[in-house]
Amino acid sequence: MDKHCFMVEKPCPVCMKTTRVIKTRSRLVVEKTDEDFCVHYKEFNPYYYKIWVCEHCGFAADEKTFLTKLPERTRKTIWDFLAQKKLDIEFTEERTLPDAIASFQLAISYLDLIHAPLSKKASMHLQLAWIYRESGDKELEEEYMHKAADFYDQSLSSERYPIGPLTDTAAMYVVGAIYYRLGDYEKCAQHLSRIIGDQAVRTREPQIFDKARDLWADVREEKKKTDAAAKKS
Ligand SMILES: [Zn+2]
């Protein structure tokens, strides 16, 4: 097992059997953080282990969802769904890139069944995008970033914030940052302007305000560059 990991046993919220899952140690050395809060750690990628998968029935979710009791009807829906699928899950102590991707794909496939909020769908798609980012698969990274941005936008117009530690301003910033990385400076500016145009945010959430203002300055630089290039051609 990787030295950054350890194993625990937890009951599965769907089949109720005890399953082995891998947790990561919290003391990791941060190398850098991207605009959209993707954190790069030294020698290790904890996103690989974000999803817990039951080794018996194949239910997959993040730790918080896995440890939350599901309503009986939801549990039954997933149980029936799993009975048809006949997943063959093999427990591995060390996850490879394909293992990590598969665990996220599985977890994403259950999100509708467990009536997960849009913000949760958004963050799952974004984290999978980060896995593709690290592996250098730009096409899939961008596909999942687009999906994450759409889910966050839908969430912002229909869900009540804060959701856990996430405020609506922070979610707005993340969408702006996603569009920045996608090179869609118009959409990025639309989202950032709603943050820096709001003086109340400045006092209430100075950290997010400053991040938005810094990114705004970068967007203006990038726009200047593209405008200049467009004039030349
Ligand atoms: Zn299970």
Image (spheres, helix red, strand yellow):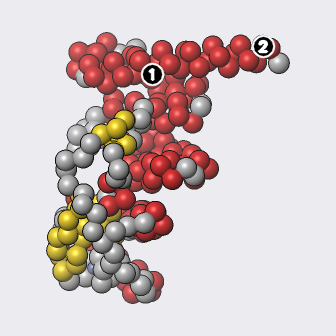
Q: Is mark 1 within 8 Å of ligand 1?
A: no
**Left or right: residue 228 compared with residue 146:** right
- Please tell me the numbered disc located at residue 215: 1
- One can see residue 147 in this view: no
- Quarter-of-image position of residue 116: bottom left
- One can see residue 90 in this view: yes
Q: Is mark 2 within 8 Å of ligand 1?
A: no
- Quarter-of-image position of residue 30: top left
The image shows residue 61 at horizontal and vertical percentages of 32, 65
Q: CA distance from mark 2 to mark 1?
A: 24 Å
The local crowd at label 1, few if under 14, some if 14 to 19, many if 20 or more residues have their Cα within 10 Å, is many
- Please tell me the numbered disc located at residue 177: none
Look at the numbered disc 2 and give the secondary structure of its residue: helix
Which residue: 20% across, 69% down? Answer: 7
The image shows residue 232 at horizontal and vertical percentages of 80, 14
Which residue: 26% across, 42% down? Answer: 29
Look at the numbered disc 1 and give the secondary structure of its residue: helix
* Circle 2: residue type: Lys
Which residue: 57% across, 36% down? Answer: 182
Query: On the rendered image, what quadrant is the C terminus found in?
Result: top right
Q: Nearer the viewer, residue 124 or 37?
A: 37
- Please tell me the numbered disc located at residue 231: 2
The image shows residue 110 at horizontal and vertical percentages of 39, 67
In the displayed structure, 38 sits above or below 86; it is above
- Quarter-of-image position of residue 183: top right
Which residue: 31% across, 12% down? Answer: 199
Contact between labelled residues 1 and 2, with CB atoms less than 8 Å apart:
no
The image shows residue 56 at horizontal and vertical percentages of 30, 84
Report the residue that reaches farthest toward the right: 233
